[in-house]
Image (cartoon, grey):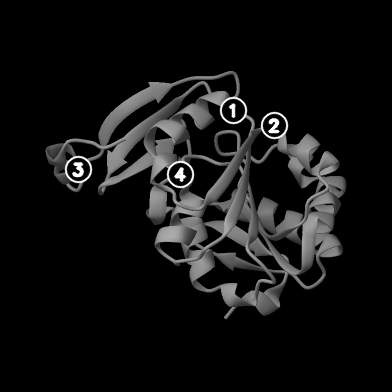
Amino acid sequence: MQQPWWKVWLSYLMELHVESAASSYNPHLYVSLKNGRYQLSTAHAVYSYEDLYSNFRRAFKVTDLDKLPGGEVLVMGLGLGSIPLMLEQTFHKDYRYTAVEVDEAVLHLAQKYVLDDLESSLEVIQADAYVFVEQCSTTFDLICMDIFLDDTVPTKFEEPAFLENLRDLLNPDGLLLYNRLAASKKDKRRSRLFYERQFLPVFPEATFLDVGGNYILFSRKTMLE
């Protein structure tokens, strides 16, 4: 959705509220305009921020995307579509996207504000990502795991069975990027324990990147430039 020019200009000086929404998954969702971009936030977390969604932007910047075996991308947790938007518009990649998002309110906001700007092929599936990876028979070259409820990753998405299903959905030489909170000492400790005890046993060639407030876990460290 196009905003008046004066609002876009003003958003570089202050964050402007655009719309609030609620759902059974996220009781406090709000869209704002900040630095000329739409940002989707909850009470305690930023879900999406167009090409300035720094967690994945910093991860993509140090990833050798040319090593991916193909262009099939699975996005788990759509937000306003920051991941496909920045891969297309910032990193100039011609990929095909499958996005899984359980929250109908998030899907509505993404379609209303951002997805029309995307030229790449995008299939959006409203589903529980845990069930999706159990049943999916398609494989992908890049999987971006970005599922939070507010500022917490639901525990079922930390289970070995879920990680093993993600591994099985990766094409040979494909890459999983898994977003984890690392804003406080407690967050960092919890994410390090998850990485060491759950992630590494499934992805023994893994590493992680501190992107400032979050860790991005890489299933294969050889993908870093």
Residue 9 coordinates in the image, percent (x, y): 15, 45
Kindly state the secondary structure of the residue where label 3 is placed: helix
Residue 178 coordinates in the image, percent (x, y): 66, 55
First along the sequence among labels 2 and 4: 4
Label 2 amino acid? Answer: Ala
Residue 56 coordinates in the image, percent (x, y): 52, 58
Per the rendering, the mark at residue 8 is 3
Q: Which residue is mark 2?
A: 127
- State the residue lying farthest toward the left: 6
Quadrant of the snapshot with the N terminus: top left
Q: Residue at x 21, y 43 (%)?
A: 11
Q: Residue at x 25, y 47 (%)?
A: 36
Q: CA distance from mark 3 to mark 1?
A: 27 Å
First along the sequence among labels 4 and 1: 4
First along the sequence among labels 3 and 4: 3
Query: As displayed, is residue 105 above or below residue 159?
Result: above
Label 3 amino acid? Answer: Val
The answer to which image quadrant residue 218 occupies is bottom right
Q: Which residue is mark 4?
A: 48
Query: As displayed, is residue 64 above or below residue 130?
Result: below
